[in-house]
Amino acid sequence: MLSTVLSSGILGVDGVLVEVQVDIGTGIPAIDLAGLPDSAIKEARERVRTAIKNSGYTFPGKRITINLAPADLKKEGASYDLPIAMGILACCGLVPEETLKGALIIGELSLDGSVRKVNGVLSMVHSAFQEGITKFYVPEENREEAALVQGAVVYGVKDLVALVDHLNGLEQISPCVVDWQAGHLDEEEAMPDFADVKGQETVKRAMLIAAAGRHNLLMVGPPGSGKTMLAKRLPSILPDLTFEECIELTKIYSVSGLLSNKNALIRKRPFRSPHHTISATALTGGGRIPKPGEISLAHKGALFLDELPEFSRSALEIMRQPLEEKRVTISRVNGTITYPSDFMLVAAMNPCPCGYFGEERCHCTPSEISRYSGKISGPLLDRMDIQVEAAAIGYEDLQQSRSSMSSAQMKEEVLRVQEIQKKRYETERISYNSELTPALIEVYCPLGQREQALLKTAFDRLQLSARGYHKILKVARTVADLDGSEEILVSHLAEVIQYRNLDRKYRF
Ligand SMILES: Nc1ncnc2c1ncn2[C@@H]1O[C@H](COP(=O)(O)OP(=O)(O)OP(=O)(O)O)[C@@H](O)[C@H]1O
Ligand SMILES: [Mg+2]
Ligand SMILES: [Zn+2]
């Protein structure tokens, strides 16, 4: 007697259909598992056997052969327990075979028969739905994230008995329906506001430009000048996520095991600020059971690296490729996996080990300073589109009662400029100025004669790389957009050139 149950595995952040085939034949009682399962799946044998017994069913004393196909997919985790158990029960005639047809089953079993939550359910349901599967049996604790897939019929399964009774028509489980529009408002919490920041007008302006064109930003300045404070206010001026973006992001959090039923949809643009002791793997992702890293958890949002030179050199260097490609590829024994990582990088640092470079109290030696800033390699620095100085705050600045712009006003500007970009790039495959390729820069950032002369002078004086040259044009495009100007003018370029000469000042 052979029965087949559909289930799913994970590759990167996408689900891959897996067929669980169970055959019960005559022979010495034993369970054979085939299909290259890892050790976790071998443990599944014991869990499935005990769970079936403890749910009150008789475990067949026959030879059971289980095959998970495709064989070449590396299968991780315990999410095949429930489909294996259902296959066995169907073979024994305890579940009508036809009720399993076309349904996808996912879940880990406890020894007592209850179904435990697993990671990546949204990704599995999302991918399977695109392949035409519409009925899903998932752990009760994962049902809300599964129900995010519009049109999918999702049943949350509490334990083995509940699913067997449902399939036999004894006691129906009601499908999970969630209204994702509701509940949105009461979730909004107050975010810190740029209005709290006194002075630092240049940094606020740089943040506005960075957010509007999704450019990377580096702040350099003495202790207590407000760098961390400013960075924490960035989310308050980023546009809200669209529903599609929410789903894309929630898949990453689902695979990482960071969702709960209460918090099944990620609605806020992420702002991740990992500590500087983070390992390269935790930053970019990977591991024995691969998981997305911080750069993927920051997808569609911002990654804030505070005290940049304190991060390990290997962690910083490994980010270079994902920063350009907006995705990260991780090599594994059998192939590679890819995670999306389209984030804005915001970093902060002091100019020297003591922090007070240029002041009388700084006694850092030139070699101490170069060792400190040398942790940030030229290529990484080159990727920081906007580099800005957060100067020490004076007494008068702190006394001023009126602050220039609130987060609400800045966000309005960001939205306006992003609308301009969306329209301009309608027929291109990009949405933001920061994504302009060299070829597109020629189309969308033409310069007049005076502008060309200015840029040439800067190129020679700042010894710019080709990347630096292109970065100036991309940021200048955003500054011109903020100004409502179709042309990039001398004033726009002059502002942006200032954002590239910090390394000169601080002898990076
Ligand atoms: N521009 C400012 N306006 C108002 N308060 C400020 C400003 N700058 C700093 N502060 C106050 O000082 C505190 C410390 O600032 P913050 O932690 O942002 O400094 P920092 O530049 O990150 O310093 P460090 O280099 O030591 O990390 C803030 O929490 C705030 O109370
Ligand atoms: Mg700080
Ligand atoms: Zn110093």
Image (tube, rainbow, N blue to C red):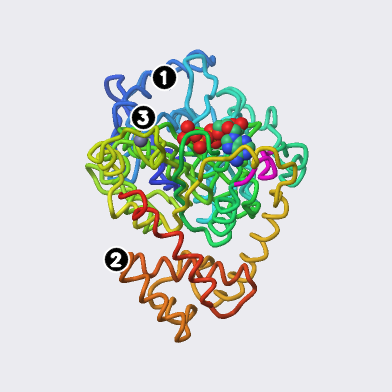
Distance from the alpha carbon under mark 2 to that under mark 3 = 33 Å
Q: Which mark is residue 277?
A: 3
**Tag nearer the camera, 2 or 3:** 2
Q: Callout 1, which amino acid?
A: Arg
Does mark 2 have its CB less than 8 Å from ligand 3? no
Q: Residue at x 32, y 68 (%)?
A: 461
Instruction: Identify residue for label 1.
Output: 47
Q: Secondary structure at mark 1?
A: helix
Q: Residue at x 45, y 37 (%)?
A: 306
Question: Looking at the image, is 111 positioned above or below residue 68?
Answer: above
Relative image position of residue 252 (x, y in whole percent) = 49, 43
Q: Secondary structure at mark 3?
A: loop
Name the magenta segment's main secondary structure.
loop
Tell me the quarter of the image containing the N terminus.
Answer: top left
Q: Which of disc 1 and disc 3 is earlier in sequence? A: 1
Q: Is residue 6 visible?
A: no
Magenta stretch bounds: 191-199
Question: Looking at the image, is 484 positioned above or below residue 382?
Answer: below
Q: Callout 2, which amino acid?
A: Gln
Relative image position of residue 209 (x, y in whole percent) = 56, 59
Q: Residues within 10 Å of mark 1 (few under 14, many from 20)?
A: many
Relative image position of residue 153 (x, y in whole percent) = 64, 45
- Residue 194 on the magenta span: yes
Q: Which mark is residue 463?
A: 2
Q: Residue at x 44, y 54 (%)?
A: 387
Q: Are marks 2 and 1 in contact (CB under 8 Å)?
A: no
